[in-house]
Image (cartoon, coloured by chain):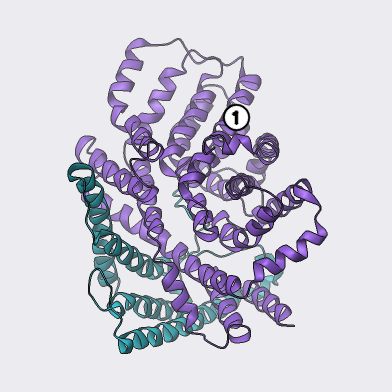
Amino acid sequence: MMALGLIALVFVLLWLRQYLVVVLAAAAIYLYLTVGGGQVSNVILDGWDELQKDVLIAIPLYMLAGQLMAEGAMARRLVRIMRALTAAVPAGLAVATCLSCGVFAAIVGSSAVTLLAVGSIMYPALLAGGYSKSFSLGLLCAGATLGIIIPPSIPLILYGVMTGTSIAELFLAGVGPGLLLLALLTAYSLATQWQLRDKRWDGVEIRVALREGTWALLMPIIILGGIYSGKFTATESAAVASVYALFVELVVYRHLNWRALKGVVLDTSRLMGGLFPVLMMALSINKLLVYQQVPQMVVGQLESLISGPTGFLLVSNALLLVVGCLMDIGSAILLLAPILQPVAESQGLHPVHFGIMMTVNLEIGYLTPPMGLNLIVAMTAFRESFGFICRAVLPFILLMMVGLIVVSFWPRLSLFLIG
Amino acid sequence: MLALETAVLLTAFATLILVTFADVALRTITGSGLLWSRDVGIYANIWLSMLGIGIASSQGSHLRPRFMDSWVRASWNSWLPRVQELLTAAGFLLLAVIATRVVADTRQLGDSNSVLRWPIWIFQLCMPVALGFATFKHALFALYPVLRPQERDETSEAPRA
């Protein structure tokens, strides 16, 4: 009865177009009133306690670094390097787009920022280079999703926070699947656009692009090198990344002024203001559920229904693909990770591997209607119809599904770096 | 109100970056970091996130699952936004009241941060303040829908056309 009441409450609030923070707050208050001993103040108190995790500091700092790079000159210079290096390769512009998305993703940790930063430069170039509108949009939308699996990744941080999984290990585990997806996109571009050759290699252009883009190229090396060498934690790496981005954009490239910087900071704060209250409520609910041993009960119920890890992988992948169509990745991780991860562990799956699989799965949600974020961003930014973009991404969704199957059933791809 | 929010927000962000980076830099150079940087960073992060609620409200960028949007009759769209804003304001008001109680309780208990030696209720104050600002804004949007910002089709990122 209590569960039915909760479901009804959530559905009515969603139907009345309530924001996720209000829906979760209502759910939390309801739960504390019914099973939490009526201690409603714990909704805020537990959320406050959970926000004391220092790893959460990494989120605004990575977001700021990404926004600075997208607004400043670093993205443009990185793309120029990739274009110069792939000029003579068949389908060179398409390969440059894939590589630019991959490198940019290794800095930003966000999909829409990658799509806009790389897309604003590469979309006109791809069209001018003879690539079809459909292929160009599909490639950009799919390539940009790499931002959430190639570390540093904000969804991976959220998964780590919600499930208590090591974020450094999640970052390490994201490398293999990220490279696999990048390779799949590149191979597909080569296979379908082989006849399109941009031009010959230009030694002068390569030298100039590398010289002017050195500062930008150092960014992923500093972030990832710092984490993987053990020099920095994920949080410290985020601090170094944001200060480095500030230094390069304000002092070296001088592309941003203080006014623009203020805009970037406020924009990042707006994103934080949307994310953190939801995170606070989700953590508060999670704490109560753990206290009430709900995950154990869910595990017990599902264990009788699902037979073995293969069955669980198939069911959870199908569930997450549907959820990815309806919900953004942040909300999906906050709501589902604490419930699904214990079940995955009970089925013998490594929590890090499951986190990566979940993220790759929800990554596909960026491309699936009706809620695919990259579809909506591309529709607005490149002024194409929603239906046209949905059709354009279709082959890339199939490609990413292949990647998802590999990631799901070959855990070693995710776990080889963490032993 | 917006100017004050902005000023506090920028200060919190600057503090977060400077303190976190200074800790890494000092530890790398001298071998020991700042003992208090973790706590200051956490509180700065909470302040900027909480005050970000108001900015998100002003710019219509709170997270909202939209898959049920088409489940209502088109004719309801004339009054549904007012109900939506009113309910949101009520939700934020409820949270603001609970947060105020939490801050008052913490103050009464005299809890203080063991590293910074500051009373914790001062840091917690950002919660009722930010939630109060958000309540006011959404109540205003319910009363004057013309002030209501257009919702942004985004989640954890910032697309700009």
Image quarter of residue A196: top right
Identify the image quadrant of the N terminus of chain A.
bottom right
Is residue B42 among what the camera can see? yes
Query: For the residue marked with disc 1, what is the amino acid?
Result: Leu
Nearest the viewer among A48 and A216 is A48
The residue under the point 46% across, 69% down is: A277
Judge the density around disc 1: few (<14), some (14-19), many (≥20) Cα neighbours within 10 Å. Answer: many
Find chain A in the image and tell me its colour: purple
The relative height of residue A134 versus residue B148 in the rendered view (above or below) is: above
Relative placement, left or right, of A15 versus A251 is right
Relative placement, left or right, of A12 versus A309 is left
The residue under the point 56% across, 46% down is: A374
The relative height of residue B66 versus residue A71 in the rendered view (above or below) is: below
Identify the image quadrant of the C terminus of chain A.
top right
Assign a secondary structure to mark 1.
helix
Q: Position of residue B34 (x, y in %)?
A: 21, 56
Relative placement, left or right, of B58 versus B155 is left
Q: Disc 1 marks which residue?
A: A185
Task: Tell me the chain of label 1.
Answer: A
The relative height of residue A262 versus residue B140 in the rendered view (above or below) is: above
The cyan-coloured chain is labelled: B
The residue under the point 59% across, 45% down is: A356
The relative height of residue B34 versus residue B9 in the rendered view (above or below) is: above
Q: Position of residue A51 (x, y in %)?
A: 42, 67
